[in-house]
Image (cartoon, rainbow, N blue to C red):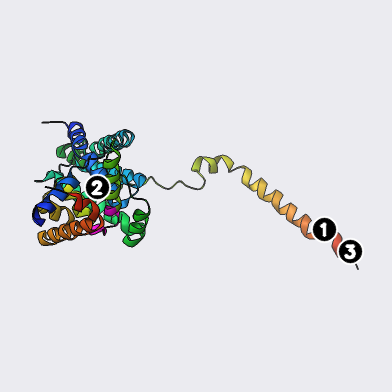
Amino acid sequence: MNPEEKDHAFEARLRALPARPLPPPVGAAVLAAAHQALGQARLSSAPRLRPPRWLVGVWAGGLAAALALHLDTPAPPARPAVSAATASAAGPLLPALEQRLHSLSLFASHSSSPLSDLP
Amino acid sequence: MASLATTLDELHAAHAAGLFRYLLGLVQCEADASDLLQELFIKLAARLPSRSVVVENERAWLWRMAHNLAVDWLRHHGTRRGAEQRSAAEPARLFAPEADPDAAEFARQVEGALAALPVEQRSVVQMKLWEGLTLDEIAAAQGIPLNTAASRYRYALEKLRGVLRPLYEEIQP
């Protein structure tokens, strides 16, 4: 046997060593994890449900129209501080009220504060 | 057309054992080889629906994935020298148990000799001798020139012959 043949025989001897099988628990775990990953990948790559373009156009147009309408609507008139009806109803009372307030202020100006009596 | 689940099952049935042996030979640790195999199949499954897996040589593509995973693992888990030192201390079981004590002893010596090889040479020998890849496929899987794959195989066999000299000398016509 020449050296080349011997090398080939050596290689063949190495190649003939029995291959170790995959441990069943490892194989099962790997396959289960792969199927789970496949399920997730399917979900993420599935086509999303999208409305047709014409519907999106109609929706956007409606929104724009509603917005424009809202902006064009005039603001309601400002409310007066005292309505005319209230003023007319209170009309007869006002002079009496003024008189009363005047008398109170006179009283206040002539009364002395307890602190003013202190030395 | 086969469903994706069936395709996954077929790829697993055809290649998982060989890929596991290859990963085990490189990282020299069963738990890590199992983790890497799982990572490989998860990546594979994630790419199946997008059909980015369509490749001409499925086997070379799978071994390329396995090789890259193992090389990344070796980079992250210490230097290659460290991995080789660990492997030399306790070589991984790459071959099926033998009933014949002489055959079992031969297998153990080969496992020890393989573990002592540099990772680059060990990976080529494993792919060529026990997984049946051609040198072209090995070069594609490892991203190296064909000549490099051939020379690594030659150097590896020379080292194996040296380490296993008594067994080599026993070979008779």
Residue B137 against residue B144 in the figure, above or below: above
Mark 3, residues whose alpha carbon is within 10 Å: few (<14), some, or many (≥20)?
few
Residue A54 horizontal/vertical position (percent): 15, 38
* Label 3, label 1: how far apart the Cα atoms are: 12 Å
The mark lying in front, picked from 1 and 2, is 2
Secondary element at image label 1:
loop
Asked if the residue at tag 2 contacts the one at tag 1, i.e. Cβ–Cβ closer than 8 Å, the answer is no
The reply to the same-chain question for discs 1 and 2 is no
**Relative to the observer, which residue lies in front, B139 or B105?**
B105
Any mark on residue B22, and which?
2
The magenta region covers B113-121
The mark lying in front, picked from 2 and 3, is 2
The reply to the same-chain question for discs 2 and 3 is no
* Label 1, label 2: how far apart the Cα atoms are: 110 Å
Q: Chain of mark 3?
A: A
Is B76 placed left or right of B19 in the picture?
right
Q: Pointer 1: what residue? A: A111
* Viewer can see residue A72: no
The residue at 32%/37% (across/down) is A26
* Viewer can see residue B170: yes
Q: Is residue A61 magenta?
A: no
Asked if the residue at tag 1 contacts the one at tag 3, i.e. Cβ–Cβ closer than 8 Å, the answer is no
Q: Main secondary structure of the magenta part?
A: helix
Residue A23 against residue B85 in the figure, above or below: above
Q: Amino acid at mark 2?
A: Tyr
**Relative to the observer, which residue lies in front, B84 or B59?**
B84
Q: Pointer 3: what residue? A: A117
Q: Amino acid at mark 3?
A: Asp
Q: Quadrant of residue A112?
A: bottom right
Q: Is residue B120 magenta?
A: yes
Secondary element at image label 3:
helix
